[in-house]
Image: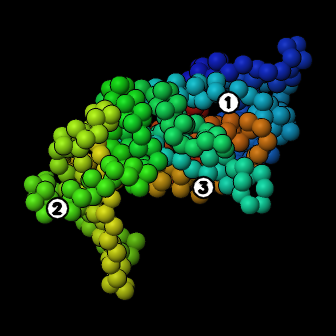
């Protein structure tokens, strides 16, 4: 059987000495991916799961020398080419996602278990691109400890086919070069504003504070109830030619928006109100902008939360060299395979089912 994921991993070079390799790289990658899909959250777990599924795995690859030990898996993943692994992942993930008018959320997450010291320093921070409608990770990029998201996000965007998408990024990614790259790749953007864009943020806030200007805004609102609270969300949007003229370096800037969230605790009756501002290349359609802003929260609620709760990512103690990033890429691959399956059940339940049901496991890994 052909395995789409492994087909795209052929660009990852094997660093080991030819002729002295006991476990071929494709077998190492397949064993690790199957281990993660079937519930393993560390190298010992991967070894145990793959050993139990050895005869099944031999239906895909020879595994002449059996399954690598946990120690061997650690050594291989410490030295794998992270850039090639991420490029292969992005090319594979692109095939899973149908090109559509989807919101692609870009946000970061710290893998707390990868910290090198008690104060938390040295932990891997990963910026990911997440297709919110498809529920798939499209790519990821590590943030250099000496830099920040501003340098990682353009590299991440360059890995993606963004044609027709709407890219949403938090305030850290609200940069002129990032906006330009998004537009040049045939996509729209919704970028949050905070104090890091001083004049842009101030001009937008003053616009919505002016009663005359605010009166001409289009508006949309919605209400949700759940988790012990009522949340009312509203969006006001307006054309921003005046802002684009004052800030001509922001390519594609078309509209500004103010999104206000009012939360009421059902028990206490206490209310909290927060207003956030955005610039976007979309037309001033408050309903569409509000939908894009809400979709962005999916990367926190559906991806980051799931990686912590279902995949136990924050407690993974893989730390040395490139292994934290490389293992995170495999976890994202496992997440995508499970999300792409449309049968009923939570991801946790599907991992258990994959462990005990070889037919289901084969369906997950099919290209």
Judge whether residue 155 can be spotted in this image: yes
Element marked by disc 3: helix
Q: Nearer the viewer, mark 2 or mark 3?
A: 2
The residue at 36%/45% (across/down) is: 191
Q: In which quarter of the view is residue 354 placed? A: top right
Residue occupying image coordinates x 68% and y 21%: 12
Residue 333, located in which quarter of the rendered image? top right
Kindly check if marks 1 and 3 are in contact, taking CB atoms under 8 A apart as contact.
Answer: no
The one nearer the camera, 320 or 334, is 320
Quadrant showing the N terminus: top right
Crowd class of label 2 (few under 14; some 14 to 19; many from 20; radius 10 Å): few
Among the two numbered marks 2 and 1 on one chain, the one whose residue lies closer to the N terminus? 1
How far, Cα to Cα, is label 2 from label 1?
A: 50 Å
Quick one: label 2 or label 3, which is nearer the N terminus? 2
Dot label at residue 161: none
Estimate how packed mark 3 is, as few (under 14), some (14 to 19) or many (20 or more) residues with alpha carbons within 10 Å. some
Residue holding disc 1: 82
Q: CA distance from mark 1 to mark 3?
A: 22 Å
Q: Is residue 283 visible?
A: no
Taking the image as shown, residue 171 lies to the left or right of residue 66, namely left
Dot 1 falls on a residue whose secondary structure is helix
Residue tagged 3: 308
Marks 1, 3: nearer the viewer: 1
Comparing 317 with 272, the one in front is: 272
Q: What x and y, as percent, mark residue 129?
A: 48, 39
Kindly identify which residue carries mark 2.
210
Instruction: Find the distance from the CA under tag 2 to the CA under tag 3.
Output: 43 Å
Image location of residue 113, percent across then percent down: 71, 54
The answer to which of marks 1 and 3 sits earlier in the sequence is 1
Residue farthest toward the right in the current orientation of the protein: 20
Q: Is residue 186 left or right of residue 308?
A: left
Q: Residue 20 or 115: which is nearer the viewer? A: 115
């Amino acid at each position: 059987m052909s395995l789409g994921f492994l087909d795209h991993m052929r660009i990852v070079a094997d660093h080991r000495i030819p002729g002295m390799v006991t476990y071929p790289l494709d077998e190492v990658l397949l064993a690790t991916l199957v281990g993660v899909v079937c519930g393993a959250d560390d190298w010992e777990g991967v070894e145990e799961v793959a050993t139990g599924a050895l005869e099944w795995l031999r239906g895909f690859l020879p595994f002449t020398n059996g399954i690598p030990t946990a120690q061997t898996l650690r050594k291989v993943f410490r030295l794998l080419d992270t850039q090639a692994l991420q490029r292969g992942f992005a090319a594979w993930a692109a095939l899973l996602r149908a090109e559509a008018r989807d919101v692609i959320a870009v946000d970061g997450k710290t893998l707390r278990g990868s910290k090198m010291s008690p104060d938390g320093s040295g932990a891997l921070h990963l910026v990911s691109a997440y297709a919110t409608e498809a529920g798939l990770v499209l790519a990821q990029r590590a943030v250099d400890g000496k830099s920040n998201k501003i340098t990682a996000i353009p590299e991440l965007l360059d890995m993606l086919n963004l044609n027709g998408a709407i890219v949403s990024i938090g305030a850290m990614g609200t940069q002129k070069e990032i906006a330009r790259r998004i537009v040049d790749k045939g996509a729209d953007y919704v970028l949050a504003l905070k104090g890091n864009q001083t004049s842009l943020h101030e001009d937008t806030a003053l616009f919505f504070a002016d009663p005359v200007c605010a009166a001409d805004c289009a508006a949309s609102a919605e209400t949700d109830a759940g988790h012990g609270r009522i949340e009312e969300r509203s969006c006001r949007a307006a054309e921003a030619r005046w802002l684009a003229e004052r800030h001509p370096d922001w390519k594609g800037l078309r509209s500004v928006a103010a999104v206000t969230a009012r939360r009421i605790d059902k028990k206490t009756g206490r209310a909290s109100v927060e207003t956030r501002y955005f610039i976007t290349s979309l037309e001033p359609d408050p309903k569409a902008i509000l939908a894009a802003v809400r979709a962005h929260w999916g990367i926190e609620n559906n991806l980051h939360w799931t990686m912590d709760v279902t995949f136990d990512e924050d407690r993974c103690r893989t730390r040395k060299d490139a292994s934290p990033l490389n293992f995170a890429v495999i976890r994202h691959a496992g997440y995508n395979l499970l999300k792409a399956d449309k049968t009923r059940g939570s991801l946790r339940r599907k991992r258990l089912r994959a462990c005990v049901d070889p037919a289901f496991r084969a369906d997950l890994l099919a290209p």
